[in-house]
Image: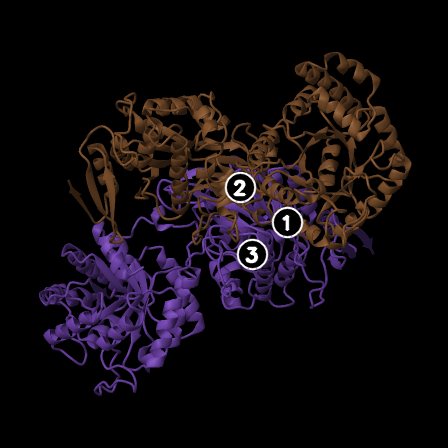
Chain colours: A purple, B brown
Amino acid sequence: MHISQKLAQARAEGKPTFSFEFFPPKTAQGVQNLYDRMDRMHGLGPLFIDITWGAGGRHSQLTCEMVKVAQAVYGLETCMHLTCTDMEKTKLDDALKEAYNAGCTNILALRGDPPREREKWEATAGGFRYAKDLVKYIRDRYGNHFDIGVAGYSEGCEDNGDVDLLIDHLKEKVDAGATFIVTQMFYDTDLFLEWVRKVRAKGIDIPIIPGIMPIHTYAAFMRRANWTKCHIPEHWMKALEPVKNDDVAVREVGKDLVVDMCRKLIDAGILHLHFYTMNLAQATRMVLEDLDIVPDLESPLERPLPWRPSLALNRRDENVRPIFWRNRKASYVARTQDWDEFPNGRWGDARSPAFGELDAYGVGLKGTNEQNIKLWGAPTSIKDISDLFVRYMSKQLDSLPWSEQPIDKEAELIQQELIDLNKRGFLTINSQPAVNGAKSSDLVFGWGPRNGYVYQKAYLEVFVSPEHIAELITRIERDPDLTYYAVNKDGDLKTNSPDGPNAVTWGVFPGKEIVQPTIVETVSFLAWKDEFYRLGQDWANCHSSVSPSRYVIEDLMDTWYLVNIVHNDFMVTHGIFQLFDGLQVEDMEKPMHTTGTPNGDAHANGTTEKTVELNGSNGEKTKIEVASDALKSAASALTNGLNGLKVSN
Amino acid sequence: MHISQKLAQARAEGKPTFSFEFFPPKTAQGVQNLYDRMDRMHGLGPLFIDITWGAGGRHSQLTCEMVKVAQAVYGLETCMHLTCTDMEKTKLDDALKEAYNAGCTNILALRGDPPREREKWEATAGGFRYAKDLVKYIRDRYGNHFDIGVAGYSEGCEDNGDVDLLIDHLKEKVDAGATFIVTQMFYDTDLFLEWVRKVRAKGIDIPIIPGIMPIHTYAAFMRRANWTKCHIPEHWMKALEPVKNDDVAVREVGKDLVVDMCRKLIDAGILHLHFYTMNLAQATRMVLEDLDIVPDLESPLERPLPWRPSLALNRRDENVRPIFWRNRKASYVARTQDWDEFPNGRWGDARSPAFGELDAYGVGLKGTNEQNIKLWGAPTSIKDISDLFVRYMSKQLDSLPWSEQPIDKEAELIQQELIDLNKRGFLTINSQPAVNGAKSSDLVFGWGPRNGYVYQKAYLEVFVSPEHIAELITRIERDPDLTYYAVNKDGDLKTNSPDGPNAVTWGVFPGKEIVQPTIVETVSFLAWKDEFYRLGQDWANCHSSVSPSRYVIEDLMDTWYLVNIVHNDFMVTHGIFQLFDGLQVEDMEKPMHTTGTPNGDAHANGTTEKTVELNGSNGEKTKIEVASDALKSAASALTNGLNGLKVSN
């Protein structure tokens, strides 16, 4: 959606809005951290974000990539900066093409920062000299596809202090086709508002977006003021100077100053504020919270679907996803990025999606070993792992190897049941409660257009110890309302589900076909299974190969079962948890340790090892290492209905 | 589905079943009448029907066509007879191909009736001599696609009285690949059961289906008995002979005899009965009702969808249709027969279906002018037409020009409201009540698999007089839960619906995506609109061009509006009817008559004629003849939002 259109809409509703600017970080880890931050800051409700163009074009490829990821993976409406003087035309073309494919519809067209040497600017051979040339070029090539922003210099720019002349240039850029203006940072609101009056007097009537620089530290504040030569009002200096050595006080005082400035702007009818975040969240968040203009994100108007849709061009119609990646959307997008088309309206029968490999960017476990050990500790028993899950479900922990974000409001509704299950050694990976026709405006469950109703089937994905898998499956199969899939690391699958996808979230809206954005389905579950066990192994690998933690995690991965259960009668709530009545993993506190064989082949508990041969329906034999009688019985539960079962010592 | 599979299933459930045989009638009107009868007799619940092969191949093309229509249009599981001795191989190939494409999976492979001359049978050049050759040929060409039945002669056949030799032939046919046996008609159950024992003793273990000939008249009974030379038990003659001149008594006595015979067969474990209906319903129905084996068709297990699905090969996956053709399924199938694929799972966005022309077979009004005048009379006022609709809604009339069948159980639930609307001059064309999650086993609304829930949005399609259209639209647009389309004969469309289809029937089932079999949508509504006004014109044309009836019907068609309304809040019942509170067509009893201009251009009520020019959004001007101020105001209601409106005298 065009920024100017979003601004017009917000203006019509008379509500102040804001946006965030980020720049490409220097390291890969920095990029990943920034993605996480952008995703979290989306929670503050920016109208859009922008990504600056790598200065001098050096990081231009990274800018393109970040725009793509922000749009496609995180579903953030993104404006791409683009500078022209340092760019060959073919590179500009490539960048515009990439932005176009990413579903990006907003470009901030800039001349480019002056080089340190302060020489006179020259266009790159075959490139452009002025931003207005770039604006015209984009308009010629892409018509109205892109909303095009240009820079406004309310206090002059580095190589030109003549504000009036710069307004003439601005007029030329607008005449060339620009549709909004973003200004350089400033601290003096009066100067800014005076400049706006002059701009308007020149007949420029497109939206003007003031650039706001929150104050992070005194040093950075002064450096930037010097660099941009913008005027610092006297009372700012008076307020900041006395606390300049106290970072916390600087941020607090700076916040008040910036908030004052923003209030003045809003009072003057400047309803949109653009924050130069410097890739940091805190200072900006403090300003926004003080201004009290963070929109009510509980409003389902902000949620077209239960999950945040991708904005990539080729995924524009996508509105169905498997539930399994609910807490790992980046991985889902990465593993499906090569699909020719994306499910919309329904998952479909004929679709046999080939999910991408586990080594694609964004799929493996994030963070360094040290970071992960710090996060999740060094478990030496099932109890330790169970405690970790209980802490996560209790909101004392923000992530698990299989969940990149804290539990959400939905999970809170069944939080006690989830905590209870985890305490008993049933590790819950994913879940949703049943919903029988909540209004689409419902604060917790609502999504989609107004005057609709949304529904959910209760869902639980749980990691089950071999000692209980047989009993659990027996109990599930007794209830005709339940469908399930159970699988182990080797991919031995047992299910009672009919062929084809099971819609577990859907919505009914005025004048529309039924929207069914979340499904459970075989092929995707097997792809998720691979990822699930791989993430477990990644976690194990954070620990030394001879450590008890490595051993206990690997042992779980090798012997436990990933089970998903759908309660198909969505009019019944809490129908799944009863399945686990009276079940409890034994000896959870017993420390598990390697027997000394470093390759991890050994098994705990000293039971006789056995091999179960499963005669699969395809005639091939699969050998499963069986560590205990419990596992044996589990494996034989899994082979029910297969051709034969032979147990050998 | 294969007949042998259906038989096995019914046998497993231990319930007696039956099937009906029809033959190709001689006239086109006869064919249409038979289709209607086959459709109605489907209501008795036959396991399948079969269509005989035109004797000597003369009507073979009609057989193929009837199989196709029965499968594709009426969704009847059909077995095609096919005889070989009088057929060239290429013709056989054509017939098999047609059956295949019709989704037909059952063939009764026959040698062919002997010619009257009683010469020795000879194969047609390049054809086959024996039925077993045909069985083998079909198996070779189509593998197991077709279930193949063969004839059994329990009392010998016309050119061969040696029952034991015929059993040897039967064995050869079974060895060649036949999978079920249908016997010639007989009256002597003991002879038949003895023959079955002999057949079984030969090692033939495929299902044996006895052919039962109900008794229609004494003459026909005797003629057939003579012709087939089958034995008539003495007590049959004793019972029938005394009443032979009383057709009613013959049917009654004959019914008892046939019922006795059927009971004996069922008691002997012969659970499936095949009725030679002779294209008549009554005698067969009497037998079935007396036997009390008509299955409970209220059971939703018999209803995979709210409408009866087509069995044609290319429509196999079709499970979405517009609601407009609810009472005209043959026309819908005819107008969509050339589609490359059929909507399944959802109607879809991209689909821009080209509906077939109105002159295709099965689309126009059925019946002769005389028949239709007898049915629907000769209306001379709106009141007369309103009365007709009231009679239809009161179940005193089985059809209307727009509805080929009586109102169904659903409509009964809102019957009083519908009658009331029609009495006030709002002619209701189609409707369904709202349903908020009825069990899929619900006797009235249920469809689809067990343990599911079905939903409906309330729907009303109504023909509205020009005097009320503006007020009605104003009222509709006041309620955010209502979406509508209003159109006149010229296709001037007004709607408040969002783009794309509106699902008005859907079901939620265990382990499945949402099924949404009925939708409301623009393109289809405009195609239905053409058909609706065409049917009205067809009805008008039943009357002489200078008759008052021709005039009054044409006037309605020229000036009234077809409106469909969906109440999108399916949790609210009866939300649509309030729209009409206090509205009533004036002067309904006033006789309308032509002013004498035979071309039908004149208009009633003597008001000044005016012309409204609608400046359509495409820039073209459409002229609508306006007969009254009421229509003028209606037309201007329709042009709301268009570019301009100019009224000239």
**Could you say which disc has been placed on residue B98 in the image?**
1
Do circles 3 and 2 both sit on a common chain?
Answer: yes
The type of residue carrying mark 3 is Arg
Relative to B321, does residue A74 appear above or below in the rendering?
Answer: below
Relative to B580, does residue A2 appear above or below in the rendering?
Answer: below
Image position, residue A204 (x, y; %): 14, 66
Q: Name the front one of labels 3 and 2.
A: 3
Q: CA distance from mark 3 to mark 2?
A: 35 Å
Element marked by disc 3: loop
Residue named by callout 3: A351
The type of residue carrying mark 1 is Glu
**Could you say which disc has been placed on residue A417 in the image?**
2
Q: CA distance from mark 3 to mark 1?
A: 30 Å
Front residue of A588 and A308: A308
Q: Name the front one of labels 1 and 2.
A: 1
The type of residue carrying mark 2 is Glu
Sequence-first tag of 3 and 2: 3
Q: For residue B72, which quarter of the picture?
A: top right
**Residue A475 in view here:** yes
Q: Are marks 3 and 2 in contact (CB under 8 Å)?
A: no
Q: Residues within 10 Å of mark 1 (few under 14, many from 20)?
A: some
Image position, residue A216 (x, y; %): 28, 66
Farthest front residue in view: B117
**Residue B413 in view here:** no
Front residue of B104 and B453: B104
Q: Chain of mark 2?
A: A
Q: Name the front one of labels 3 and 1.
A: 1
Element marked by disc 1: helix
Q: For residue B10, which quarter of the picture?
A: top right
Residue at horizontal 20 percent and vertical 75 percent from the top: A228
Q: Chain of mark 1?
A: B
